[in-house]
């Protein structure tokens, strides 16, 4: 049975040409460093984001936490926006794996300001009570659907360099950000020392993310990846999908963005709905119901009965995500199904 799945762009199954690439992949043992397809993927990924080296990792959260684990000393402090994925949706892993403290800054849609960063930077030799700041983390595209522009990225990076601090970019959807800004992805990754980006969010790969940075950083991360249980064997079957994701799927994201805009426009025509049009920059549509009495759990069930999968409300907002498997016809079916649900209240 075919479902229209709007829960996330992580739900994308693999198109046939990606499966064929996986089936035909040449493989080795990546822990020994001799899987040719993984080697090809890592070289390609590093080139695309303008870094010296890259490392294939099992997931985005794994890549982010590996970055913290590699950059930071235990007991140090990481400056981050309060709404970023690393602090909001990664199970408190930074305290367990890297052993660091996250110093959150209230921000609007993930945008950190230089003055807010500077007043939180601390060094252990300043005061016996202080931890030492070891890293600044940024997210682009942001989980709110916002995209930080290059000036905002540069301001954060320049502030970090002023204090000789590294910047890690959670770029899970960095290709969406580049698509929205109409820039090369290197124009974004130029303002970070390390970057994680997902191959399985919107790019249709079944598994995996990339962590990229300079050669020394990646060499250290490779050993720590093994410590974290991320040393895979014949990983080339997965890496082959990642190569297709980067070479082909990353170039079609504007289609997902256009479908998200269409979905937002159609939803916004409904008087019961208030769509967040300010953060309609990538493939996510956020909206809320003007009537708080609407039973969103019943809505989730009604949609499922009509072969549509959605998540329930979070922090007062519904989120629909478009991706490779969502067509314009699907958009209109979703809107019509929602109209039917509201008419039966």
Image: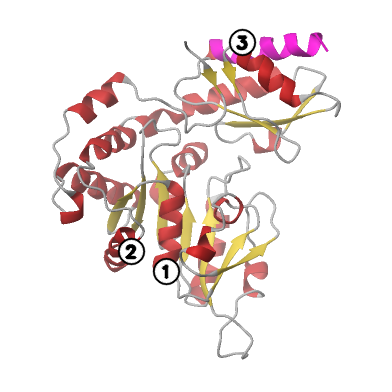
Point out the stretch of residues depicted in magenta: 329-345
Residue of label 1? 71
Q: How many residues crowd around disc 3 within 10 Å: few (fewer than 14), some, or many (20 or more)?
A: some
Cβ atoms under marks 2 and 1 closer than 8 Å: no
Considering only order in the chain, which callout, 1 or 2, is on the residue closer to the N terminus? 1
Query: Per the image, is 121 magenta?
Result: no
Q: Identify the image quadrant of residue 248.
A: top left
Instruction: Give residue 53's mark.
Output: none
Query: Per the image, is 338 magenta?
Result: yes
3 vs 1, front mark: 3
Residue 189 seen in render: no
Residue of label 3? 306
Q: Secondary structure at mark 1?
A: helix
Residue of label 2? 224
Prevalent SS, magenta region: helix
| Quadrant, the C terminus | top right
Residue 258 position, x and y percent, is: 54, 24
Considering only order in the chain, which callout, 3 or 2, is on the residue closer to the N terminus? 2
Residue 297 position, x and y percent, is: 72, 25
Q: How many marks?
A: 3
């Amino acid at each position: 049975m075919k479902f229209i799945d709007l829960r996330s762009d992580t739900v994308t199954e693999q198109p046939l040409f990606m499966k064929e690439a996986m089936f035909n992949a040449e493989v080795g043992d990546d822990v020994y460093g001799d899987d040719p397809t993984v080697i090809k993927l890592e070289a390609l990924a590093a080139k695309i984001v303008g870094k010296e080296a890259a490392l294939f990792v099992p997931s985005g959260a794994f890549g982010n936490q590996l970055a913290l684990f590699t950059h930071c000393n235990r007991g140090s402090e990481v400056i981050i926006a309060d709404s970023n994925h690393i602090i909001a949706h990664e199970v408190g892993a930074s305290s367990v794996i890297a052993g660091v403290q996250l110093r959150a800054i209230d921000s609007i849609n993930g945008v950190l300001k230089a003055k807010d960063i500077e007043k939180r930077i601390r060094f252990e030799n300043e005061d016996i009570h202080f931890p030492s700041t070891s890293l600044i983390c940024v997210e682009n595209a942001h989980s709110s659907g916002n995209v930080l522009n290059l000036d905002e990225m540069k301001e954060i990076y320049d502030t970090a360099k002023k204090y000789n601090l590294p910047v890690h970019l959670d770029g899970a959807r960095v290709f969406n950000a580049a698509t929205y800004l109409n820039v090369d992805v290197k124009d974004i990754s130029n303002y970070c020392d390390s970057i994680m980006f997902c191959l399985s969010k919107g790019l249709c790969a079944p598994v995996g993310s990339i962590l990229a940075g300079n050669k020394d950083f990646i060499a250290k991360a490779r050993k720590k990846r093994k410590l974290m249980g991320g040393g895979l064997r014949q990983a080339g079957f997965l890496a082959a999908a990642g190569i297709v994701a980067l070479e082909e799927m990353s170039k079609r994201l504007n289609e997902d963005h256009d479908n998200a805009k269409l979905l937002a426009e159609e939803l916004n025509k409904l008087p019961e709905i208030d769509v967040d049009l300010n953060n309609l920059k990538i493939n996510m549509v956020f909206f809320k119901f003007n009537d708080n009495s609407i039973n969103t759990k019943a809505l989730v069930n009604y949609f499922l009965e009509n072969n549509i999968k959605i998540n329930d409300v979070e922090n007062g907002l519904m989120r629909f995500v478009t991706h490779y498997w969502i067509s314009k016809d699907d958009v209109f079916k979703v809107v019509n199904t929602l109209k039917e649900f509201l008419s039966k209240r």
